[in-house]
Amino acid sequence: GSFLLDVGTFSTSGAASFDSIRTVLDAGGFFASRSFRLRNGDVTIADAHRSHEFVLSADQGSILVTGTIDASGETGGSISLSARNNLTLAAGSRLTVAAEHFNSAGKGGSILLEAGTQRDGVANVSALLDLQAGSAIDLGVSDYVPGSYTVAGSSASEGKFTGTLHLRAPRTA
């Protein structure tokens, strides 16, 4: 199933915390798509979240990932994390859109990580995108065959490429 939540804030603990909501979604079988919009405050992803499409935006806050977001599957899924303030992948965190097979367009999964998103047309130029040592991002496709586009039989020669990583943050220089 699919789930969409647009909320003012998340509680830092208890039944209304972000990770507690995950438990309810897992029990209800919501693994196709999960989309969260947090209008105020920060959010921490500390547990393992599984959904083929995972979207989280923090309109006025930061996102800290210490756990796992798993959008892997038969074909690669998608993960989109967008924060007005900082976006941090802490040591030990893991994002995966790994695929068993390329999709019909010859592509793997996709990950968008964005810090300093715009509000009323103005970006937060002090925001940081922090990918810490020990964090992991998996864009792999099991069917991938190494080689350049000139090597017959390679994935590249067939126009098939592993996942896409899009990093977006304000320029400071």
Image (cartoon, rainbow, N blue to C red):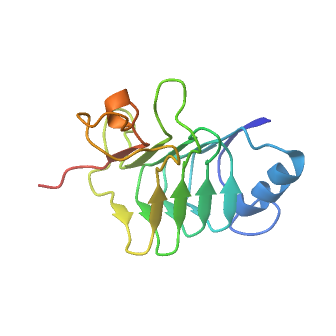
Comparing 63 with 66, the one in front is 66
Q: Quadrant of the N terminus?
A: top right
Count of picture labels: 0
Comparing 143 with 27, the one in front is 143
User: Is 72 situated left or right of 165 in this image?
Assistant: right
**Residue sitting farthest toward the left:** 173
Q: Quadrant of the C terminus?
A: bottom left
Q: Position of residue 18 (x, y in %)?
A: 70, 58
User: Is 127 situated left or right of 82 in this image?
Assistant: left
User: Is 164 situated left or right of 48 in this image?
Assistant: left
- In the rendered image, the vertical position of residue 151 relative to residue 15, given as above or below: above
- In the rendered image, the vertical position of residue 26 relative to residue 156, given as above or below: below
Q: Residue visible at 36% across and 64% down?
A: 130
Q: Quadrant of residue 129?
A: bottom left
Q: Quadrant of residue 55?
A: top right
- In the rendered image, the vertical position of residue 146 relative to residue 122, given as above or below: below
**Residue sitting farthest toward the right:** 27
**Residue sitting farthest toward the top:** 105
Q: Position of residue 108 (x, y in %)?
A: 48, 39
- In the rendered image, the vertical position of residue 18 relative to residue 133, given as above or below: above
Q: Residue visible at 23% across and 34% down?
A: 150
Comparing 41 with 2, the one in front is 2
Q: Position of residue 85 (x, y in %)?
A: 41, 55
Q: Quadrant of residue 17?
A: bottom right
Q: Position of residue 79 (x, y in %)?
A: 54, 45
Q: Residue visible at 78% across and 62% down?
A: 20
